[in-house]
Amino acid sequence: MIPQDTTPQAEDNPLNTATRVFLGDLSGDGLLAWRLAVDGDRPGPDERNMQTEFMMGWYCIAYSHEVGVGQVKPVRYFAQDLAVWRGEDGQARVIDAYCAHYGANLAVGGKVYGNLLECPFHAWRWNEKGACEEIPYSKVIPPKAKRDNCIPSWPVREVNGMVMVWHHPDKAEPQWEPIEFSEATDDGWTDFRTYEWHVGTAMENIADNAVDVSHFKYVHGAKTVPEYEFEFDGIKRTITSYLKMHTPRGEIDGKIESISYGPGQGYVRFSGITDTVMMTGTCPVERDVTHNRMAFTQPKANVDGPTAGLTRAIVKDITRQFDQDKVILDRHKRVDPPLVCAGDGPFGRNRIYYEQFYASSTKPKPAAA
Ligand code: FES
Ligand SMILES: [Fe+2]
């Protein structure tokens, strides 16, 4: 997904009719509900060729404000149920959801006890390393329960208003740190406006979408396909595009810089008409379901001034584009490797970039150019 200037011509472009007809008049609560829904009747992940392992990386599993001090929240990612809680010291913690004693879901009915998570079934109290520290009715804690990772635990960092966990298929330690973005703590920038989708596809397909330059015309109604520069540097992928943006004040040169730090964390900066920063958090839920978050911030000075309309329009346009992507991605089958032609984006190079995040032989094949 790369935001584009599509607003002026999208209404007239017959080429994006399919997604527009599908989206129809969806708006308001109906649109929000649709964004989080995934068709339960679709073919399974094997039939749709979505069996690859989940890539290593840092992933957003909750916004910070969703887990207050003393609260516990059940979440499901990487095809597992997890428990997220925030202790009285303000620190967010994540362990697998199922209690090692008798299997209760710690996140459903469990409560925060100091910095520990107390099970709703027999009140065993667990720390962030997945070790039991207290059993209120017993003087002796079984040695196995006292060990770290008796319940598997997850490395957690909290940056940019997001609770992030490190996922590695082999449970290896973090190999890099998540990136902090200065706008997230800059008083001159607004609080984040957040949007989210569940997409019925493997997250690799959302990753491919960013370099799929020709779909901008056919899915998003872009009048032309802008020029892109792609740069791959270790875990960092940068896509820069320059485009003419049509505004009531005439044509303005716009620049979009989209940076990924591994598969789960992204940062997009729009400059030209009005500065906008979008953080993205993409995290697999199941093999064939991905949670995509977008959080926008803009300079406070732009929100109420003469650029107010444009600042709203740019966010609306980007989220509308992802609605259109969801229509396609909810239904598609992974073609591996894809059959590409001249004029397609750098699918092959992009898949080589993503290969570094797989730990085993289940990685997808690079595209045949
Ligand atoms: S199942 Fe958790 S304390 Fe018994
Ligand atoms: Fe797209």
Image (tube, grey):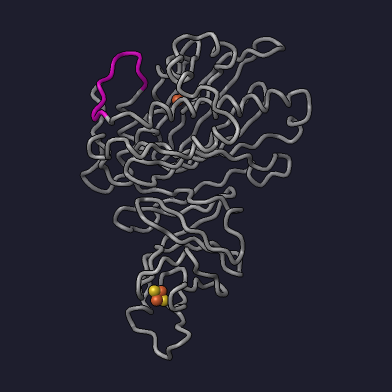
Work out whether residue 99 can be spotted.
Answer: yes
313 in relation to 160, above or below: above
Q: Residue at x 61, y 60 (%)?
A: 68
Image-quadrant location for residue 140: bottom left
Was residue 124 drawn as part of the magenta stretch in this picture? Answer: no
Quarter in which the C terminus is drawn = top left
Q: Nearer the viewer, residue 283 or 21?
A: 21
Q: Magenta region, mostly helix, strand or loop?
A: loop
Work out whether residue 150 can be spotted.
Answer: no
Image-quadrant location for residue 165: bottom left
Q: Residue at x 27, y 48 (%)?
A: 359
Q: Residue at x 35, y 46 (%)?
A: 286
Looking at this view, name the residue that lies furthest to the right.
Answer: 305
Q: Position of residue 242 (x, y in %)?
A: 54, 18
Image-quadrant location for residue 194: top right
Q: Position of residue 205 (x, y in %)?
A: 35, 33
Query: How many discs appear?
Result: 0
113 in relation to 42, above or below: below
Q: Position of residue 139 (x, y in %)?
A: 43, 91
291 in relation to 48, above or below: below
Magenta region, residue range:
335-345
Looking at this view, name the residue that lies furthest to the left.
Answer: 361
Left or right of 255: which side holds 124? left
Q: Nearer the viewer, residue 64 or 264?
A: 64
Q: Taking the image as four quarters, which one is ligand 1 found in?
A: bottom left
Q: Position of residue 18 (x, y in %)?
A: 42, 17
